[in-house]
Image (spheres, rainbow, N blue to C red):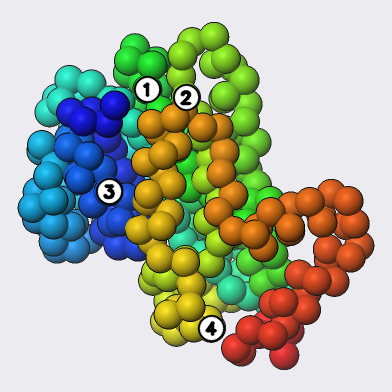
Amino acid sequence: MVKNKSVIITGASSGIGEATAIAFAKQGAKLLLAARQLDKLNVVKETCLSNGAVSCEVLVCDVSKEEDCKKLISFCINKYQAIDVLINNAGVSMRALFNDCEIDVIKKLMDINFWGSVYCTKFSLPYLLQYKGSIITVSSVAGLVGLPGRTGYSASKFALEGFMQSLRVENLKTGLHVGIIYPGYTASNIRNTALNSSGVAQKESPLDESKLMSPMQVADEIIKMVKHRKRSKILTGIGKISKWLSILLPAKSDKVIYNFVAKEKDSPFK
């Protein structure tokens, strides 16, 4: 079902994107990997080819730039003559109270996390519709409940939620598959690159990365979503509880989330 399918993965140089590329490679897919760092992309490319990818191409792409996203889709069509799967994974986080945060930080998160997915989806949509393909967007528990200290991140993921849900309903009768996956905290460099109040990478994770979900766990679930054309998947019990608690007991939910974030190393509440 995935073998020989053409798959675009953004943010493919590390973390969930890298793991997803390897997972699709093992299924015999044809890959186009996009990120901003060519050296890291080339390392992932070699790993994918050694793990069974039929083909693997890389392209430097800053998804916050509309023209880069347009070039990415054109490159895929020129190379593979089709787009079967689009994985909107590229993203950046933040860690700062909104009161302390520069507005440009919020704009940057929206440009990458929201607009990057919108651009890639827009330009690939005609081809995905032609082949009744799949769009999988990597969201977060922060797209289900607002996380303090991550106002821009939650805003971008909430925006994606509305966009993808609307797109799904628009295409109920076209055969397009739209899926959203919600990982919990996943071991990756996203917290190291998370922006502080001034828009500079914080460089140190406040969490014990060794205790977090592995990127390959997320990648395996993405493969299942594509194969079975699932609409959504929340990967952690905490994520499921957070969603329902916010609906059934919203005031209690606020306190639980506040206390959870307050316990983080160098919490913004301290």
* Label disc, if present, on residue 146 of the rendered structure: none
Mark 2: amino acid: His
> Could you give the CA–CA distance between mark 4 and mark 2, rounded to whole angstroms?
36 Å
Task: Report x, y in % for residue 30.
Answer: 17, 35
* Label disc, if present, on residue 23 of the rendered structure: 3
Q: Earlier in the sequence, mark 3 or mark 4?
A: 3
Is residue 202 at least partly visible in the picture?
A: no
Residue matched to label 4: 206
Q: Earlier in the sequence, mark 3 or mark 2?
A: 3
Q: Earlier in the sequence, mark 1 or mark 3?
A: 3
Vertical arrangement, residue 116 with respect to residue 148, above or below: above
Question: Residue at the location (90% across, 57% down)?
Answer: 249
Mark 1: amino acid: Gly
Q: Are marks 4 and 1 in contact (CB under 8 Å)?
A: no
> Could you give the CA–CA distance between mark 3 and mark 4, rounded to whole angstroms?
28 Å
Comparing 230 with 75, the one in front is 230
